[in-house]
Image (cartoon, rainbow, N blue to C red):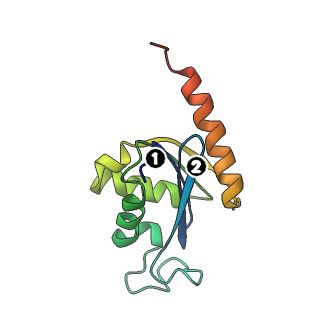
Amino acid sequence: MSHYHAVIWVDHREAHVIRFGKDEAESALVHAHGGDRQIHHRSGSVSGRHGTEDPDFCRKVAEAVKTSSEVLLTGPAAAKLHLYDWWKKHDAPTADKIVGIESADHPSDGQLLKHARAYFDAKDRMRPQA
């Protein structure tokens, strides 16, 4: 099913992706390679990269939002920025979907969806009415 809005919560191990409309939502969980353990810089993977620096992980997260038009990107620390920067360099169509980037600890999927709905409701109200 296609949903106009999506929210991503990402850290270096996984991405929680929720695509949603007014009355429905569907979620996906994308794991980074080796995401079941904490990866320290330059250790824990053959490449020495965190999940958000791993091209395969970045592509899988992009695939999860390919049918959405507007995406809110959230997460702790720099993981969300690494992912966004990778998309800007290697996947401009996905980067162009990002309408907001926010810091967030680890919310439940329900909390994440509630926050995203409020974010997009406020954003949509700010658009000029035709």
**Residue 118: % across, % down:** 66, 37
* Residue toward you, 77 or 99: 99
Mark 1: few/some/many CA within 10 Å (<14, 14-19, 20+): some
| Percent of width and height locating residue 115 | 67, 45
Q: Specify whether 88 is left or right of 1.
A: left
Check disc 1 and report the residue beneath it.
3
Q: Nearer the viewer, residue 57 or 119?
A: 119
Specify whether 112 is left or right of 25: right
Q: Is residue 33 above or below residue 79?
A: below
Tell me the quarter of the picture where residue 63 sits.
bottom left
Looking at the picture, how far across and down is residue 3, in whole percent?
Answer: 46, 47
Which of marks 1 and 2 precedes in the sequence? 1
The answer to whether 45 appears left or right of 102 in the picture is left
Q: Are marks 2 and 1 in contact (CB under 8 Å)?
A: yes
10 Å crowding of disc 2: few (<14), some (14-19), many (20+)? few
Q: What's under tag 1, amino acid-wise?
A: His
Which residue sits at x=43%, y=75%? 49
* Residue 80 falls left or right of residue 86: right
For numbered disc 2, what is the local secondary structure? loop
Q: Which residue is mark 2?
A: 24
Task: Measure how far apart labels 2 and 1 are at the Cα level.
Answer: 9 Å
Does the image show residue 42? yes
